[in-house]
Amino acid sequence: MNTRSDKHVPKHKKKKKIYRVLLYIGLAFLIVGLSYGSYVGFKFYQALNQIQDLDYSQEHQIDSDLDERDFDRNEDINTGPGSSTEEIEKLVREGNTMSVLIAGVDSEHGQFVGRSDVLMVAAIDLDSQESTLLSIPRDTYVEIAGTGEYDKINHAFARDVNTSVKTVENYLNIPIDHYVAVNFTGFETFIDFLGGIELDVERTIYHNLHPDRIYLYPGLQRVNGENALQYVRFRADNEGDFGRNRRQQQVIKEVIDQTTSIRTVTRLPEVLDIMGNNIRTSMNTRTMFDLTRNLSSLTGDNVETLRLTGDGKMLNGVYYVDVAEEDHLKVVNDLQDRLNIEYKTVKRELES
């Protein structure tokens, strides 16, 4: 017989056989990895093409340099006659921070249009991974940028996103680096994608016009996308917008805490599919990568919440929220502090 047992095979041939097996296994993993990486890359750039508002980004040339922004104080500092420069007080950013306007809107046929039902500003410190989240009542009485007219702040988005961004910048006296608009359908879909979220519901949530139609009862429970949306949009009680703002911030912090398991490459394609259909943003690819990398370990405990408060008032039969001047000033100062920006005296060349 010509058969030979492995014990008679020379050791160097055994090693070659093992190396070949390991090589094939390694190549198989490499091929699978490259294929999956290509798929993820395709899904990522496909989503980017859908969510990026390139017209807005190109028009505004978003930059962290505050010198290009219109935030000078009204009065100049006198430098004396005959001088070729003048000194002004200008907002200057010292730290590695970013501000993002977050608008919750309905979309029509893929177009993000209409009033912003949810309006927030996130002030993010990219070094410390700490964030501050401000909720702005949708009925806040403000001057709408570029019009000279006063109206509810959520009406600014109905004109266009630029008007909304500029209105918020003027009202809060901070630069808005980027915006993110989220479709409510996408909010529901994302919550369902997570399998719902654990939420300590603070009160009974019911239909605005039909109090006997109950969506949620108080207590800790798992909430699906539809009910989570009802929770963050509810304002039929005496608190109105102020209670709703608190609940919006509660839900966002819970989502942050409960998304750690999907901050991985294996879940990325599914997330991108949802993002592509339901988000618009001025962020470019590099900004999104940097933001994702810097906030990979962000938790709800790292998110500070701020709220504007005030009193309701009627003007010509229309309800508005009138934010107290003292409260408004405190929030403005807090945001400027979180963004590490402050007024500093700088010199500017005079026009000849």
Image: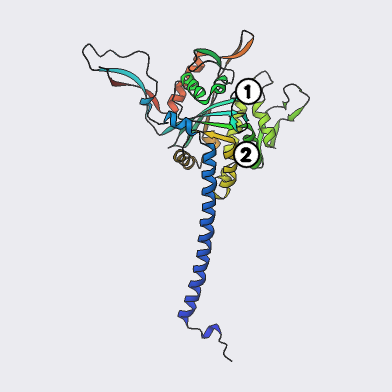
Where residue 203 appears, x then y in whole percent?
A: 69, 27
Mark closer to the observer (2, 1) = 2
In the rendered view, tell whether residue 252 sits above or below residue 296: above
Residue 139: which disc? none
Where residue 108 appears, x then y in whole percent?
A: 63, 30
Reading the image, the residue beneath label 1 is 243
User: On the rendered image, what quadrant is the C terminus found in?
Assistant: top left
Element under disc 1: helix
Compared across the picture, whether 5 is left or right of 96 comes to right
In the rendered view, tell whether residue 265 sits above or below residue 88: below
Hey, what amino acid is under mark 2?
Phe
Identify the residue at horizontal 78%, vertical 24% (top origin): 212
Where residue 286 appears, x then y in whole percent?
A: 44, 40
Where residue 224 appears, x then y in whole percent?
A: 69, 37
Compared across the picture, whether 222 is left or right of 129 comes to right
Number of marks in the rendered image: 2
Reading the image, the residue beneath label 2 is 190
* Most distant residue in the right direction: 212
Q: Earlier in the sequence, mark 2 or mark 1?
A: 2
Hey, what amino acid is under mark 1?
Gly
Identify the residue at horizontal 45%, vertical 38% (top origin): 287
